């Protein structure tokens, strides 16, 4: 039987206990998640007949495996400072030599700095259509709270070639449940089975604290304090990333964040610069 990347990446069974806990803790509606999943599935059915999920997954895997550094960009308050420091001290070539994966609105900052984006992982509430179209791949997530955004982005999803649909309910034939909860930890969950021993992962702008970065939503102009629900989501995201480290055997570094975790390696910007220059 031919190997299926969709089956390899799909993590609904492994992630199911997390999902049940999240549904209960946030009082989310399972039926709404399924409604969003089915809507995105129908949208993908309207794509050109040549659309082939397995072929897109294979080409995405090839991009992931081409370079040793993988940078995952979140929308935390340290994002702008960190990216600008790296540009000043390591130059744009550093990002040109990385696989750059943006969680939702982090794509805006990367586009402003003219940094190539290999993939955006998004539930569509942090990006606009312009940012969507500038990525090589877009992984669109469907959940009960973004049905109206799926409708708004419908034609963009249909017209964009390298789009991958995800769900947090049971997967459909043309969607994947990669695991994960927020866009940031969903990136790590999605790529976890695609990693090679050579890979090092750098989490940039992923702070998981009580301040939300201004790139998290298009209408936000400055950093602001997280409300209790958002803070709880970020705490879940951190817990899930720590849980994923059992699957990800590669080094995972958090850059320029005050986060305290016994399972994640923290690097200051200066430490990060020295590490890259020594490699």
Image (cartoon, rainbow, N blue to C red):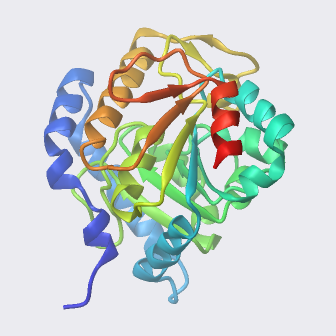
Q: Quadrant of the N terminus?
A: bottom left
Is 188 on the left-hand or right-hand side of 279? left
Rendering quarter of residue 136: bottom right
* Residue 164 placement (x, y as % from top left): 47, 65
Using the image as rendered, state which of residue 262 and residue 46 is in the foreground: 262
Whether residue 100 is visible:
yes
* Residue 222 placement (x, y as % from top left): 73, 16
Total numbered labels placed on residues in the image: 0
Q: Residue at x 70, y 26 (%)?
A: 270
Rendering quarter of residue 224: top right
Is 37 on the left-hand or right-hand side of 110? left
* Residue 33 placement (x, y as % from top left): 30, 45
Whether residue 127 is visible:
no
Q: Residue furthest front?
A: 278
Above or below, 254 against 258 in this view is below
Using the image as rendered, state which of residue 135 and residue 154 is in the foreground: 135
Above or below, 115 against 90 in this view is below
Q: Residue at x 74, y 44 (%)?
A: 110
Rendering quarter of residue 57: bottom left
Is 123 on the left-hand or right-hand side of 236? right
Q: Residue at x 15, y 36 (%)?
A: 20
Using the image as rendered, state which of residue 242 and residue 48 is in the foreground: 242
Is 106 on the left-hand or right-hand side of 6? right
Q: Residue at x 20, y 36 (%)?
A: 18
* Residue 159 placement (x, y as % from top left): 64, 72
């Amino acid at each position: 039987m031919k190997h299926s990347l969709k089956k390899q990446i799909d993590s609904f069974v492994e992630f199911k206990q997390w999902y049940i806990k999240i549904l209960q803790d946030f009082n989310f509606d399972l039926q709404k998640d399924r409604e969003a999943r089915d809507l995105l599935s129908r949208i993908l059915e309207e794509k050109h007949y040549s659309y082939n999920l397995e072929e897109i997954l294979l080409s995405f895997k090839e991009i992931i495996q081409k370079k040793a550094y993988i940078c995952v960009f979140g929308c935390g308050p340290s994002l702008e400072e960190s990216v600008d420091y790296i540009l000043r001290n390591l130059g744009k070539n550093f990002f040109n030599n990385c696989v750059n994966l943006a969680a939702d609105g982090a794509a805006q900052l990367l586009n402003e700095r003219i940094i190539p984006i290999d993939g955006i992982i998004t539930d569509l509430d942090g990006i606009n259509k312009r940012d969507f179209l500038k990525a090589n791949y877009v992984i669109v997530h469907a959940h009960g709270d973004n049905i109206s955004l799926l409708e708004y982005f419908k034609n963009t999803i249909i017209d964009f070639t390298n789009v991958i649909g995800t769900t947090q309910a049971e997967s459909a034939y043309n969607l994947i449940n990669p695991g994960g909860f927020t866009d940031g930890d969903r990136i790590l969950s999605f790529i976890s089975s695609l990693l090679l021993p050579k890979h090092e992962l750098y989490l940039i702008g992923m702070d998981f604290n009580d301040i939300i970065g201004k790139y998290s939503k298009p209408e936000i102009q400055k950093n602001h304090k997280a409300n209790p629900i958002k803070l709880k989501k970020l705490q879940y995201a951190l817990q899930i990333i720590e849980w994923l480290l059992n699957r990800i055997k590669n080094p995972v570094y958090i850059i320029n964040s005050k986060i305290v975790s016994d399972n994640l390696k923290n690097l200051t910007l200066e430490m990060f610069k020295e590490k890259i220059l020594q490699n």
